[in-house]
Image: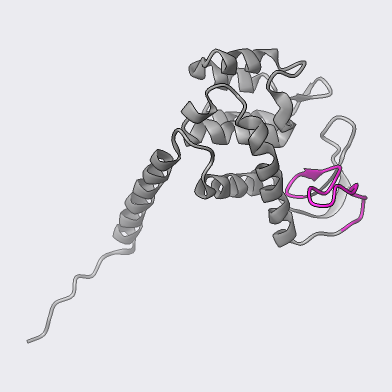
């Protein structure tokens, strides 16, 4: 007796996998709630930063940023996070080393972010948005000069107002940067 096998179309296969991926994402988000970022959340941030920053194999001045900091890899600026040595124009990097620098930066900034009131109450999405913000502007933004609006919203756990506050920080040297507008819109969903 010949056993019938069910053939599915490519479209059906993609749909089934999309559902499985969505369920896995929900499970990860649920597991990450009320806790510091999980490895899965950190990897999601690494992937996001890689997409947003793009890869620069050779260090060069970042002409879009105030002061033209030297940038290499996936947005690593001024100093290498592992050696603390200055990045020099013309130095080369591999994609693997550049990803390692993202992970190092995220792991070193997370303790500062965990000091934000309500960090443990935030879901993974909120934490990820603040990780992205900290990666871009430095993790010490909470309570710092010129960050009064975002500090106030976080201090008072006004979660619904945080995306609007994040969107205020889209300039470098007083000039609105399209890349920052896009980055804020993606992480805040607005």
Looking at the image, residue 187 sits to the left or right of residue 86; the answer is left
The verdict on residue 82 being magenta is: yes
Looking at the image, residue 25 sits to the left or right of residue 72; the answer is left
Nearer to me, 91 or 63:
91
Name the spot of residue 16 as percent of width and height, x first. Answer: 30, 56
Name the spot of residue 15 as percent of width and height, x first. Answer: 32, 54
Give the total number of marks visible in the rendering. Answer: 0
Quarter where residue 13 is shown: bottom left
The verdict on residue 188 being magenta is: no
Looking at the image, residue 27 sits to the left or right of residue 75; the answer is left
Residue visible at 82% across and 34% down? 64
Which is the main secondary structure of the residues drawn in magenta?
Answer: loop
Residue visible at 79% across and 51% down? 82
Looking at the image, residue 94 sits to the left or right of residue 28; the answer is right
Q: Which colour scheme is used?
A: one colour
Give above or below for 92 relative to 184.
below
Outermost residue toward the bottom in this view: 1
Residue visible at 53% across and 49% down? 39
Name the spot of residue 98 as percent of width and height, x first. Answer: 73, 55
Quadrant holding the N terminus? bottom left
Nearer to me, 13 or 85:
85
Residue 182 visible in the snapshot: no
Give above or below for 143 relative to 81.
above
Outermost residue toward the left in this view: 1
Chain part drawn in magenta: 73-91
Quarter where residue 3 is shown: bottom left
Residue visible at 60% across and 24% down? 116
Residue 175 visible in the snapshot: yes
Name the spot of residue 140 as percent of width and height, x first. Answer: 73, 28
């Amino acid at each position: 007796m010949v056993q019938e096998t069910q053939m599915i179309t490519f479209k059906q296969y993609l749909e089934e996998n999309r559902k499985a991926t969505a369920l896995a994402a929900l499970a990860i988000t649920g597991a990450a709630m009320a806790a510091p970022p999980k490895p899965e959340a950190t990897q999601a941030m690494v992937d996001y930063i890689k997409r947003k920053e793009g890869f620069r194999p050779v260090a060069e001045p970042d002409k879009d940023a105030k002061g033209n900091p030297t940038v290499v890899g996936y947005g690593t600026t001024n100093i290498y996070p592992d050696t603390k040595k200055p990045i020099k124009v013309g130095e080369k990097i591999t994609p693997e080393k550049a990803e390692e620098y993202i992970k190092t930066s995220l792991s070193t900034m997370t303790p500062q972010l965990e000091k934000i009131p309500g960090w443990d109450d935030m879901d993974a999405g909120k934490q990820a948005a603040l990780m992205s913000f900290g990666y871009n502007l430095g993790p010490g933004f909470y309570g710092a000069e010129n960050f009064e609006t975002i500090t106030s919203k976080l201090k008072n756990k006004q979660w619904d107002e945080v995306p609007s506050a994040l969107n205020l920080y889209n300039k470098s040297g007083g000039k609105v940067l399209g890349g920052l507008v896009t980055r804020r819109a993606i992480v805040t969903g607005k």
